[in-house]
Image: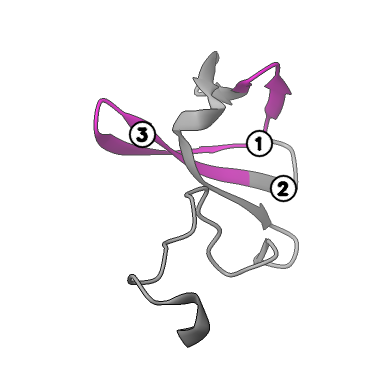
């Protein structure tokens, strides 16, 4: 890994969450393709639940929010629209 940037991402695999770290990621159609170990692995985007970019030069995560989950927003409890 010669890159200053690392990608940390999690995917759902048969109900279990798996987390990977890589310095090489690309999008191909509806898949995230990452170099994991010495092999390229492809993950469908609808299984990716977490994705964070880490800058090794500053030891900071680069994301819009401290924790970015690729999940649909949680809906509020059933409330009448006038109560929102």
Residue 45 in picture, x, y percent from top left = 55, 29
Instruction: Identify the element where label 2 is drawn.
Output: strand
Q: Residues within 10 Å of mark 2 (few under 14, many from 20)?
A: many
Marks 3 and 2, how far apart at CA: 23 Å
Q: Is residue 67 above or below residue 51?
A: below
Residue that mark 1 sits on: 23
Q: Main secondary structure of the magenta part?
A: strand
| Residue 37 marker | none
Residue at figure coordinates x 45%, y 31% from the top left: 47
Give the total of numbered labels: 3
Instruction: Identify the element where label 1 is drawn.
Output: loop
Residues under numbered marks 2 and 1 in contact, where contact means CB atoms less than 8 Å apart: yes
* Magenta highlight on residue 82: no
Snapshot quadrant of residue 78: bottom left
Residue that mark 2 sits on: 5
Residue 60 in picture, x, y percent from top left = 66, 67
Residue 25 in picture, x, y percent from top left = 67, 29
Instruction: Identify the element where label 3 is drawn.
Output: strand
Bounds of the magenta span?
7-32
Relative placement, left or right, of 18 versus 31 is left
Q: Earlier in the sequence, mark 3 or mark 2?
A: 2
Residue at figure coordinates x 71%, y 26% from the top left: 26
Q: Residues within 10 Å of mark 1 (few under 14, many from 20)?
A: some
Q: Residues within 10 Å of mark 3 (few under 14, many from 20)?
A: some
Q: Is residue 81 above or below residue 6?
A: below
Name the image quarter holding the N terminus.
top right
Residue that mark 3 sits on: 12
């Amino acid at each position: 890994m010669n890159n200053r940037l690392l990608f940390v991402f999690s995917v759902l695999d048969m109900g279990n969450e798996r987390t990977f770290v890589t310095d090489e990621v690309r999008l191909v159609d509806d898949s995230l393709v990452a170099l994991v170990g010495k092999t390229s692995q492809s993950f469908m985007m609808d299984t990716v639940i977490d994705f964070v970019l880490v800058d090794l030069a500053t030891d900071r995560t680069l994301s819009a929010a401290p924790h970015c989950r690729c999940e649909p927003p949680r809906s509020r409890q059933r409330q009448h629209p006038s109560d929102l």
